[in-house]
Image (cartoon, helix red, strand yellow):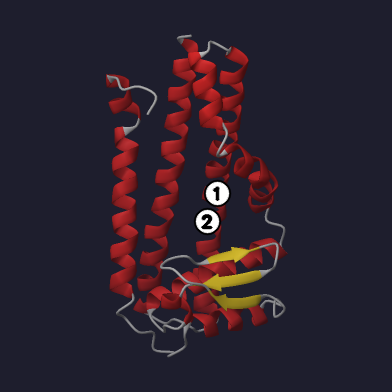
Amino acid sequence: MLFFSPLDIVLLVPALLLSVYAQFKVSNTFSKMSQVRASSGLTGSQVAKGLLQANGLGHVGVEMVEGRLSDHYDPISKTLRLSPDVYQSNSLAALGVAAHETGHALQHKASYFPLTIRQSIFPVVRFGSTLWLPMFFIGLFMSIPALIDAGIVLFAAAVIFHIVTLPVEFNASKRAIAQLKSGGYLVGNEVDGAKKVLDAAALTYVAAAAMAVLQLIRLLLIRGNE
């Protein structure tokens, strides 16, 4: 925190509370739906491989990676990496998450525009994530406006990344539910269970974007007072 004022309460506390709630929601929902088994009996890895094959993406690998909720799609190596709780489980939560990550692979195949934007700015975001704060601080305390502005620009790139992530994640979940239903992997109320997990996960991205936008506003207000 660069300083604390009543404005911080107005700008950041609501977003922080939303972030805490979102993390609790996704963890709690995932745990609950992990106890509900899909009638198909298929595991997350089997569903992912089946969906990939059905969509002409049999060349995309499916691997297990350590960690909880560490699931992701790597567009560079074209690999789905699923956590043990998803890879090995036949729960509604596992199938929902596996299908969601498959949705990202489908986006990659279709050159989904928001995903293309996110991939293109990722190197800048990765580079700027460790530099924006020290640049802003140094510029602020040494009264170097150009350095302050450079820090803000780098942070703004991260904000854009968070905003673009929203349609990417929502679309991947939409594709996941459609694929699970059309492929017969989930039936009846099972679809609702998987959707609850994906909706909870989406809330974490909304919270992250809100926090980033409000932090950017805060930095701009600090810059305006210089």
Q: Nearer the viewer, residue 18 or 188?
A: 18
Look at the image and tell me in which quarter the N terminus lies.
top left
Q: Residue at x 46, y 41 (%)?
A: 209
The picture places residue 165, in percent across and down from the top left corner, at 55, 49
Q: Residue at x 56, y 25 (%)?
A: 135
Badge 1 crowding class, 10 Å Cα cut-off, few under 14, some 14 to 19, many 20 or more, is many
Residue 126: mark:
none
- Classify 47 as above or below 130: below
Q: Which residue is mark 1?
A: 165
Q: Which residue is mark 2?
A: 169
- Picture quarter containing residue 4? top left
The Cα atoms of the two marked residues, 1 and 2, are separated by 6 Å
- Picture quarter containing residue 207? top left
* Residues under numbered marks 1 and 2 in contact, where contact means CB atoms less than 8 Å apart: yes
Q: Residue at x 44, y 30 (%)?
A: 215
Q: Nearer the viewer, residue 187 or 118?
A: 118
Query: On the rendered structure, is 42 left or right of 196?
Result: right
Badge 2 crowding class, 10 Å Cα cut-off, few under 14, some 14 to 19, many 20 or more, is many
Query: On the rendered structure, is 223 left or right of 147?
Result: left
Q: Amino acid at mark 2?
A: Glu
Query: On the rendered structure, is 154 left or right of 193?
Result: right
Q: Nearer the viewer, residue 73 or 2?
A: 2
The picture places residue 177, in percent across and down from the top left corner, at 49, 70
The picture places residue 33, in percent across and down from the top left corner, at 32, 74
- Classify 107 as above or below 20: below
Does residue 191 appear anywhere in the picture? Answer: no
Q: Residue at x 63, y 41 (%)?
A: 127
Q: Is label 2 in a helix, a strand or a loop?
A: helix
Q: Is label 1 in a helix, a strand or a loop?
A: helix
- Classify 126 as above or below 54: above
Q: Amino acid at mark 1?
A: Thr
- Count how many numbered circles sit on residues in the image: 2
